[in-house]
Image: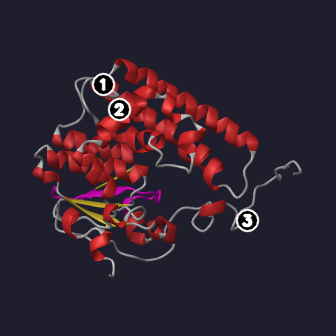
Amino acid sequence: MSEYVPPSVWEWKQGNGGRFANINRPIAGATHEKELPVGRHPLQLYSLGTPNGVKVTLMLEELLAAGHTGAEYDAWLIRIGEGDQFGSGFVGINPNSKIPALLDRSGPEPVRVFESGAILLHLAEKFGAFLGGNRAETLSWLFWQMGSAPYLGGGYGHFYAYAPNKQEYPIDRFTMEVKRQLDVLDRRLAESEFIAGAEYTIADMAIWPWYGGLVRGWLYGDSVTFLNAASYTHVQRWAQAIFDRPAAQRGRMVNRVQGDLSSQLWERHEASDFDTKTQDKLAPK
């Protein structure tokens, strides 16, 4: 393979980008007019069951489980592979065209919230829940996740699992960083039951879908073997403890479009949808 020499001025080559070439582009803004649906609940979520999307549905289900009835929500499916995030309605809520996006209609005027960490913090402050006894510690780990996960997803995940060809340098570079991050978490969880201390917080909800999912084998093919995920015993313990929470299991189902049909709840409008509207019950027999 010949060495790549960057041109003086970069130009976009459409189709270059591997698995996500059809939705990657160097400009922002809407590509088409499309209004978003609106349900009857105070909170309207537009998302997909990726790790970033799961953060928010996990939080909402935990709030409801804790008795916060004002956290009732409608979850609408945004198929990012088909470009739903570039519709005018979605861009109106999130100009960055990334899921998840939340419209909070509980006040006199709707409030848009985008970026998963911002949504978690908005909900935690709104309901006075899951910020933990040490707010500074919770927010430090929340923002640790926001800064670290791009190396896991856009770096390691892309080059290890999605790039059109495998290259040693980027895989080694991002593997080293992801293992360093897992070691950071493992050392922290050796001294603390949860990420921010003794209490379960939005820091756990932000980190678990990414790093808990990684060590449980949910992300990027055989990464659980490649990264020797079993060696991070404290992360494993923590990941299992959260997985055992019923609200976390429900949160993983919402807007999910892969896996067993019984685990896929494409839209969520009522708590009863978990029992009656998963894809195994809706799919043609």
Q: Is residue 37 visible?
A: no
Question: The magenta stretch spans which residues?
Answer: 93-111
Residue 238 disc label: 2
Callout in the foreground (2, 3): 2
Which numbered disc covers residue 13?
3
Kindly give the residue lying farthest to the top in the view shown: 191
Residue closer to the observer: 49 or 280: 280
Q: Is residue 218 left or right of residue 38?
A: right
| Label 2 element class | helix
Of residues 201 and 217, which is closer to you in this image?
A: 217
**Does 107 appear in magenta?**
yes
Where is mark 1, residue-wise?
A: 193
**Which of label 3 and label 1 is nearer to you?**
1
Q: Quadrant of residue 179?
A: top right
Q: CA gap, disc 3 to disc 1?
A: 48 Å
What sort of colour scheme is used for the picture? Answer: secondary structure
Helix, strand or loop at mark 1: loop
Q: Earlier in the sequence, mark 2 or mark 3?
A: 3
Q: CA distance from mark 2 to mark 3?
A: 43 Å
State the SS at label 3: loop
Q: CA distance from mark 2 to mark 1?
A: 7 Å
| Relative to 101, residue 173 above or below | above
Can you name the residue that lies furthest to the right here? Answer: 2
Decide: few, some or many residues near mark 1? Use Cα within 10 Å; few <14, some 14-19, many ≥20.
Answer: some
Which quadrant would residue 40 be assigned to in this image?
bottom left
Location of residue 282 with respect to 161 vertically, above or below: below
Q: Where is residue 72 shown, x and y percent of the image? A: 17, 57
- The quadrant the C terminus occupies is bottom left
Q: Characterize the magenta stretch by its predominant secondary structure.
A: loop
